Image (cartoon, grey):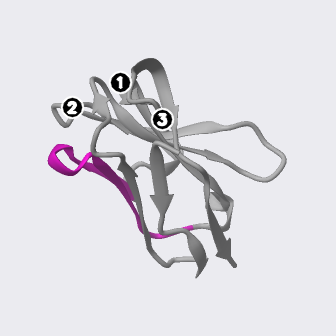
Amino acid sequence: VQLQASGGGLVQAGGSLRLSCVASRSMRIDDAMGWYRQPPGKERELVATITNSGSTNYADSVKERFTISRDNAKNTVYLQMNSLRPEDTAAYYCNAENVVYYDSQGAPVAARYAWGQGTLVTVSS
C-alpha cells in the first residue's frame, strides 16, 4: 500500500473528524492529491482535491464544511471535516495523481493514480 489513510470513526451529527493520508517517502507525486468517498450502496465520488501549488476543488455537498490541505514535505494530505451530517457516512479514500514509486525490487513504477485503503466515517443522527 503506497498511501495510508487514517482518522475515520464514529461521530455524531454536527461533529468533526480529521482524516490523514501519508504517501510513502519514496513516492514522487507530480500532480494533485485528493479525497473520494463511497457511501454504502453508491458509486465513489469526489470530495476534494488539492494541487501541488495548493489550489483546491470541492464537491458542492462539502463546501464550507470540509477543508483539504497538503504538506508536500511529508507527502501527506489532510481532510478536516466539520459540521458532519449522516449523509457524509462513507468509506473515504485518498488518491494521488501522476506518481512514481518503487516496487519490491527497487525498480521505479510510474502510475496515473495511486489509491489508499479506505477509512470508514460513520455519522450518527
Q: Say whether disc 2 or disc 3 marks the residue closer to the N-terminus.
A: 2
Q: Is residue 68 magenta?
A: yes
Q: Which residues are magenta?
A: 66-84
Question: Which residue is denoted by mark 2 in the rendering?
Answer: 52
Q: Say whether disc 2 or disc 1 marks the residue closer to the N-terminus.
A: 2
Question: Which residue is denoted by mark 3 in the rendering?
Answer: 104
Q: Quadrant of the C terminus?
A: bottom right
Q: Secondary structure at mark 2?
A: loop
Viewer-side residue, 66 vs 105: 105
The amino acid on which the numbered mark 1 sits, given as a three-letter code, is Val
Q: Is residue 124 magenta?
A: no
Residue 100, numbered circle: 1
Which residue is at a point 27% across and 23% down the rendered structure image?
Answer: 30
Residue 119 placement (x, y as % from top left) = 59, 60
Quarter of the figure with residue 86: bottom right
Which residue is at a point 30% across and 50% down the rendered structure image?
Answer: 76
Quarter of the figure with residue 121: bottom right
> Horizontally, is 41 left or right of 56 in the view?
right
Residue 51 placement (x, y as % from top left) = 26, 31
Say above or below: 4 vs 9. above
Q: What secondary structure do most residues of the magenta stretch adopt?
A: strand
The amino acid on which the numbered mark 3 sits, given as a three-letter code, is Ser
* Mark-to-mark CA distance, 2 and 3: 27 Å
Say above or below: 79 vs 35. below
> Horizontally, is 59 left or right of 67 in the view?
right
For label 3, the crowd category at 10 Å Cα-Cα, with few meaning under 14, some 14 to 19 and many 20 or more, is few
Q: Secondary structure at mark 3?
A: loop
